[in-house]
Image: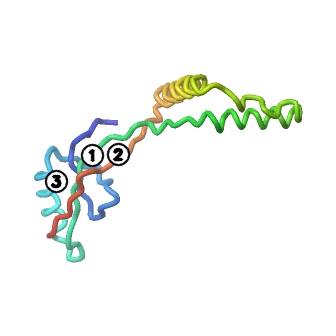
Amino acid sequence: MENNEGKWVVSTSPEFFNSGDYYESKEEAIAFGLIEYAAYETVKKFHVGQVESVGLGVCVNTDSILEHINQSMCDEVGEAADDYLLYTKQEHDAELEEELSNVIIKWIEKHSYQPTFFKVINIESVDI
């Protein structure tokens, strides 16, 4: 995806910017919106906002993973596995979280699953 960080977008909805057009400045975006939407009698205002990229959203919950492993072991062998992996050291959990996050990030990048969407900040309404 092209990096449009900091560019400006235009929409008739303050919550959904998806026109595919990006502008170098807020003034350019407003000028486009005034021309584009002036012909529509039902559009009384439009919105401009600035593109901000998002991260990959990788969040690993090691507690859940270890609990799932514990439950699988309990299902397999019964009571003997009751406390398996439930009392791990905090620094080991942090290490596992970092390693799993890195694996997921590499997988996302390898298969090009990076987000094709973005956040819009600095949203302003413009009356026509």
Q: Are marks 2 and 1 in contact (CB under 8 Å)?
A: yes
Q: Is residue 77 left or right of residue 9?
A: right
The amino acid marked with disc number 2 is Phe
In front here: 87 or 81? 87
Q: Please identify the quarter of the rendering in which residue 12 is found.
A: bottom left
Q: In the image, what residue occupies the spot 10% across and 53% down?
A: 27
- On residue 51, the disc is 1
Neighbourhood count class around disc 3 (C-alpha, 10 Å): few under 14, some 14–19, many 20 upward: many
Neighbourhood count class around disc 2 (C-alpha, 10 Å): few under 14, some 14–19, many 20 upward: some
- On residue 16, the disc is none
Q: In the image, what residue occupies the spot 39% across and 42% down?
A: 116
Quadrant in which the N terminus appears: top left
Q: Are marks 3 and 2 in contact (CB under 8 Å)?
A: no
The CA span between labels 2 and 1 is 6 Å
Q: In the image, what residue occupies the spot 55% across and 27% down?
A: 94
Q: Which residue is mark 2?
A: 118
User: In this rendering, is residue 87 above or below 126?
Assistant: above
The amino acid marked with disc number 1 is Val
Q: Which residue is mark 3?
A: 29
User: In this rendering, is residue 77 above or below 31?
Assistant: above
The CA span between labels 3 and 2 is 17 Å
Q: Please identify the quarter of the rendering in which residue 78 is found.
A: top right
